[in-house]
Image: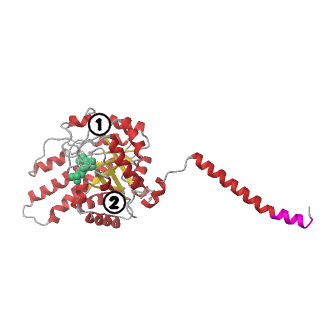
Amino acid sequence: MPLVPMRILLDHAAENNYGLAAFNVNNMEQIQAIMEAAKETDSPVIVQASRGARSYTNDAYLRHLMLAAVELNPKLPIAMHQDHGNSPETCLSAIKQGFTSVMMDGSLSADGKTPSTYEYNVQVTRQVVRAAHAKGVSVEGEIGTLGGIEDGHGAGLSSAEAAKHITDPQQAQQFVADTGVDALAVAIGTSHGAYKFTHKPTGDVLVMSVIEEIHRRLPNCHLVMHGSSSVPQELLEIIRRYGGQMKETYGVPVEEIRRGIQHGVRKVNVDTDCRLAITGAIRKTFAESPEEFDPRKYLTPAREAMKQVCLARMTAFGQAGNAGKIRIKTCKQMISFYKPKPKAKTRAKKVVKKVVKKVVKKLAAKRPAKKSARKSGRR
Ligand code: G3H
Ligand code: 13P
Ligand code: ZN
């Protein structure tokens, strides 16, 4: 099957109350790790690429790697998503490259750093929604601002600053109405990267209650959690044991993500955990076998380590076992789904017009018969 629009995966997840991990990729081994885990667990897949990933792979390598993933896994529905599009241009070029879903992150200005205004966010997101939906491509928007910086994208807010940028549920409701996005990323105190929390997070820094309130107001909107790596202590430990320097840090506990999934979270972004797993495995190989110089010798365990992270998340979020159950739609088929439906009044008017037309036609057909009856003198 071709790459599928993300919207159908999110809809299925919502109907069956599970979440989908969206893993970031930059190279072949990461894509292979995700696909192997998905195959083993029969999971639908969201693969996402940041702007950094697109320039690292020069788009063309990425596109062909994804085509290989599709070819080798014909039974798995796979969505290809632009992560943190900084402008409509970025999103449009992703669509041209065959992405089936895009994120217009208008919570920041086009520089990917400065928090923007609500009006700017609505304007650019609406523009992307219009263009993407005309091609059946799904759109994620963001309201509120995350902390942390990764590859230039992120407001670079400290935890205290980030707390001030937590999504306002009322504004989230307005934003969805103003833009028509398929999915909404919300800020609840998480940040990108490994350094999220100095202690295992409690409800005052990781405000899951905001998710619950947004879901109460927007029960039909698919919510997205960014910065949702769990930063497992055992992965940090492996990196440290083999010479890496990782300071004390804590991520988003899987049980909190599962709580989010109970309240409308359908997409959970995970990048850092995969990076940690890969780095630990490579460091271990280098430390234990310093004579190795064949990249396959350290990339194979690295790929395996990332696969284990993917397996764990796919299972924990509930997407495992669902790939075969999804009714597939292509982007082309999604175009009519997004076309504005005629209003009830207009529809009723159309029906009346049709009936009147039919009656007039019937009467017209009867008229010549009456004439000929008169001519023949019959009564
Ligand atoms: O949103 C951030 C993701 O972790 C992607 O990171 O921009 O370094 O590729 P990146
Ligand atoms: P992490 O850095 O927590 O993995 O978050 C990734 C992310 O949100 C990508 O958009
Ligand atoms: Zn993100």
Identify the residue under disc 1: 166
- 135 left or right of 295 in image: right
Q: Is 104 situated left or right of 336 in this image?
A: left
Percent position of residue 111, x then y: 23, 49
Tally of marks: 2
**Please, what is the dominant secondary structure of the magenta stretch?**
helix
Mark 1 or mark 2: name the one nearer the start of the chain. 2
Task: Check disc 2 and report the residue beneath it.
Answer: 39
Label 1: element kind: loop
Q: Nearer the viewer, residue 248 or 351?
A: 351
The amino acid pointed to by label 2 is: Lys
Q: The C terminus appears in which quarter of the rendering?
A: bottom right
Give residue 56's position: percent from left, percent from top: 21, 60
Q: Is residue 185 visible?
A: no
* Number of residues whose C-alpha sits closer than 10 Å to that of mark 1, classed few (under 14), some (14–19) or many (20 or more): many
- Name, please, the residue furthest toward the left: 291
Residue at figure coordinates x 46%, y 59% from the top left:
333
- Which segment is the magenta one? 368-377
Residue 221 position, x and y percent, is 41, 44
Q: Is residue 260 magenta?
A: no
